[in-house]
Amino acid sequence: MKRHESIAPISRQHHSGLLTARLLQRGAPPYKGMPTTPEAKRDYTLTFLEQHLLPHFKLEENTVFRLAPQVSGELAQQTKQLQEQHQLLESLILALPDATQTELPDKLHKIGKLLEQHIRHEERVFFEQLQQELPDEKLQALQQLVQQHLRE
């Protein structure tokens, strides 16, 4: 799926999210240089949240999530659901240190599945619809807004 230049930087960040999502799911193959035990995956996920997910969520929320509701009711509804998923993912990840050793694999799997579904929806549905429905001048404004946030 070809991304408009305004959305491409956000879309590129999804690669590491998908890798992490797969890593957390039950039955994931070992990835070179990535954690393999549930405890190491938990620690990796907490660091990933702080270093990657939260800045990524902020970027989305301050750019595409601000413009999308202005385009259509359907995009407004998707934006609301995606923001709720951001909050859910953050809370599930922050709760990982409280998980028992027996609960941890299931909790990691749940986070991995939700993160993958979230990213796939953004890529396959939300971004596709946004770049089709957003007028060119708004896409240009979005591009400037995204670049501004990436510089901060």
Image: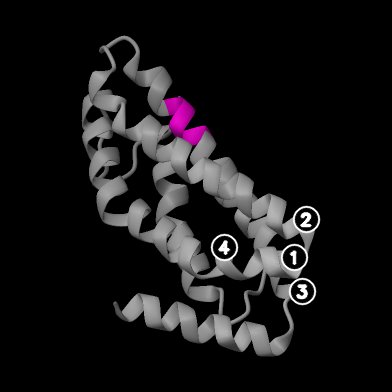
Residues at circles 2 and 1 in contact by the CB criterion of under 8 Å:
yes
Q: CA distance from mark 4 to mark 3?
A: 15 Å
Question: Disc 3 residue type?
Answer: Gln
State the CA–CA distance, disc 3 to disc 2: 13 Å
Q: Nearer the viewer, mark 2 or mark 1?
A: 2
**Mark 1 in CB contact with mark 3 (< 8 angstroms):** yes
Which structural element holds mark 1?
helix
Left or right for 17, reference 7 = left
Viewer-nearest residue: 129 or 34: 129
Amino acid at the residue labelled 1? Gln
Label 2 belongs to which residue? 74
Decide whether residue 141 is among the magenta residues. Answer: no
Q: Which residue is mark 3?
A: 132
- Mark 2 to mark 4: distance in Å? 13 Å
Residue at point 56%, 80% (across, down)? 142
From the image, give the main secondary structure of the stretch colored magenta.
Answer: helix
Residue at image location 67% in from the left, 90% down from the top: 137
Q: Position of residue 148 (x, y in %)?
A: 39, 82
Q: Is residue 68 left or right of residue 108?
A: right
Residue type, mark 4 in image: Phe
Q: Amino acid at mark 2?
A: Glu
| Residue drawn at point x = 72 percent, y = 59 percent | 75
Figure check: 145 above or below 127: below
Tell me where residue 78 appears, x and y as whole percent: 68, 51
- Regarding residue 100, the answer to whether it shows in the image is yes
For label 1, the residue is 129
Q: Which residue is mark 4?
A: 65
Estimate how packed mark 3 is, as few (under 14), some (14 to 19) or many (20 or more) residues with alpha carbons within 10 Å: few
| Mark 3 or mark 2, whichever is nearer to me | 2
Label 4 element class: helix
